[in-house]
Image (tube, rainbow, N blue to C red):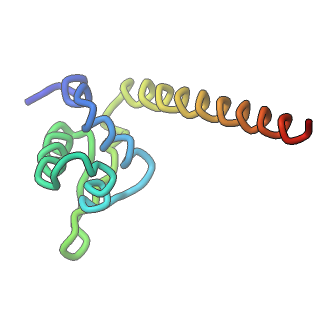
């Protein structure tokens, strides 16, 4: 069995984990977001994340629905939340700066 850091060390698994961090998504929805790899590859990554306890899966009809198992991650959850939050905050700040510059250019 792989440890949590080894599991999330793979960039595509990071993307999957981030996708299901705050919401539930079907395997198909996840695969649509990871269009650079096959559905089979997405399925394998999901299996590793489920086996590692980092995401939960439930059945809904014929679909499987995935969501991050944040309670299982312990201190790792705090780190990932802060890490992704900082990236989003930086992106928001950049977007606001660009918007402000664009507005100033229009006003002149």
Task: Identify the image quadrant of residue 66.
Answer: bottom left
Q: Position of residue 79 (x, y in %)?
A: 43, 24
Task: Identify the image quadrant of residue 72.
Answer: top left
For image coordinates 25% across by 37% down, the residue present is: 13
Seen from this angle, which residue lies furthest right?
A: 108
Question: Relative to residue 17, is residue 6 depicted above or below?
Answer: above
Question: Relative to residue 38, is residue 10 depicted above or below?
Answer: above
Between 91 and 108, the one nearer to me in the picture:
108
Between 27 and 41, the one nearer to me in the picture:
41
Seen from this angle, which residue lies furthest front?
A: 108
Between 105 and 53, the one nearer to me in the picture:
105
Position of the N terminus, as image quadrant, is top left
For image coordinates 30% across by 44% down, the residue present is: 16
Classify residue 105 as left or right of residue 1: right
Q: Position of residue 91 (x, y in %)?
A: 59, 32
Task: Identify the image quadrant of residue 98.
Answer: top right
For image coordinates 27% across by 51% down, the residue present is: 35
Classify residue 80 as left or right of residue 31: right
Seen from this angle, which residue lies furthest bottom?
A: 61
For image coordinates 34% across by 59% down, the residue present is: 25
Between 5 and 44, the one nearer to me in the picture:
44
Q: Position of residue 84 (x, y in %)?
A: 48, 31
Question: Relative to residue 32, is residue 91 depicted above or below?
Answer: above
Question: Relative to residue 58, is residue 107 depicted above or below?
Answer: above
């Amino acid at each position: 069995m792989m440890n949590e850091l080894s599991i999330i060390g793979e960039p595509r698994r990071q993307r999957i984990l981030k996708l299901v961090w705050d919401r539930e998504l079907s395997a198909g929805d996840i695969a649509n977001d990871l269009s650079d790899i096959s559905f089979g590859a997405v399925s394998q990554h999901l299996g590793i994340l489920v086996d590692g306890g980092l995401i939960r899966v439930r059945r809904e009809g014929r679909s499987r629905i995935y969501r991050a198992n944040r309670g299982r991650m312990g201190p790792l959850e705090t780190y990932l939340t802060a890490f992704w939050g900082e990236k989003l905050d930086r992106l928001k700040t950049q977007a606001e700066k660009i918007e402000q510059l664009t507005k100033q250019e229009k006003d002149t």
